[in-house]
């Protein structure tokens, strides 16, 4: 009887992990990885000790070269890290378990890049549009279009500056004052 309950518990544990692994694998495209690489990360997420490539290969049934490529991709997006363990000569890897930290770094870097690139383009475009507006030889219709473009760019600049503030609030943790990690309980 005890063995039967133990087996049932093991099956439930496996089913619970599998449900989350499937959902993580399905949504990892947000981070620029394929579902199979997402499955690797999700499988590693439920491992509580660092894994070698051989361990991962056995768990997922992938070839070692494929596994190596997948782990490298996960390292590039900072969701898997190489760790050192005394006495081990093989590379060991562990999955990032803190989704808040990972989210902050991953999207913060992307949003910061978006803001910087677009602000530089806006500055450059404004210089050219102002050149048009200040040139007395330019047709009035073209000046009207340039003025409209400048107004639109001002709205775009506001968005980029807002995005920079969002990045700062995410990276500093300030955002959690407005959106606490723990959901408030309603009575």
Image (cartoon, rainbow, N blue to C red):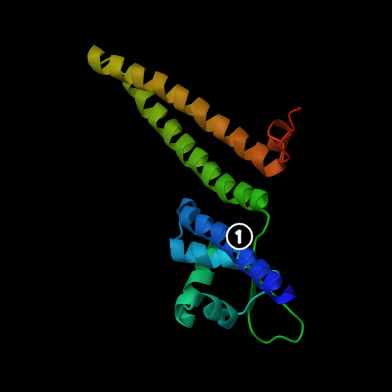
Using the image, determine if residue 67 lies above or below residue 29.
Answer: below
Which residue is more in the foreground, 75 or 155? 75
Q: Position of residue 138 (x, y in %)?
A: 25, 18
Which quarter of the image is occupied by the N terminus? Answer: bottom right
Name the residue: 46% across, 59% down.
33
Residue 69 vs residue 143, the one in the foreground: 69
Image label count: 1
x, y percent for residue 17: 60, 62
Decide which of 141, 107 is in the foreground and name it. 107
Question: Residue at coordinates 52% horizontally, 79% vertically from top-left?
Answer: 57
Image x and y of residue 52, in percent: 61, 79
Residue farthest along the top direction in this orientation: 140
- Give the structural element (helix, strand or loop) at label 1: helix
The image position of residue 54, as x and y in percent, is: 57, 83
**Position of the C terminus by quadrant:** top right
Residue at image point 29% right, 14% down: 144
Q: Residue at x 43, y 32 (%)?
A: 122
Question: Is residue 49 something that shows in the picture?
Answer: no
Q: Is 181 placed left or right of 23 in the picture?
A: right
Query: What is the quadrant of residue 151 in the picture?
Result: top left
Which residue in the structure is indicated by mark 1?
16
- Whether residue 150 can be seen here: yes
Which image quarter: residue 36? bottom left
Question: Is 87 above or below relative to 123?
Answer: below
């Amino acid at each position: 009887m005890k063995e039967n309950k133990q087996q049932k518990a093991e099956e439930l544990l496996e089913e619970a992990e599998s449900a989350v692994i499937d959902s993580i694998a399905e949504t990892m495209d947000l981070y620029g990885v394929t579902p199979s690489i997402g499955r690797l990360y999700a499988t590693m997420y439920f491992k509580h000790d660092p894994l070698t490539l051989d361990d991962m290969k056995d768990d997922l049934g992938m070839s070692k070269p494929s596994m190596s490529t997948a782990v490298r991709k996960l390292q590039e997006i900072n969701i898997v890290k190489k760790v050192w363990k005394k006495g081990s000569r093989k590379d060991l890897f562990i999955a990032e378990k803190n989704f808040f930290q990972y989210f902050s770094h991953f999207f913060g870097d992307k949003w910061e890049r978006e803001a910087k690139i677009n602000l530089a383009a806006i500055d450059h475009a404004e210089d050219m549009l102002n050149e048009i507006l200040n040139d007395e030889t330019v047709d009035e219709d073209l000046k009207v279009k340039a003025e409209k473009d400048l107004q639109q760019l001002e709205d775009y600049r506001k968005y980029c500056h807002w995005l920079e503030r969002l990045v700062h609030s995410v990276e500093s943790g300030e955002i959690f004052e407005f959106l606490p990690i723990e959901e408030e309980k309603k009575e």
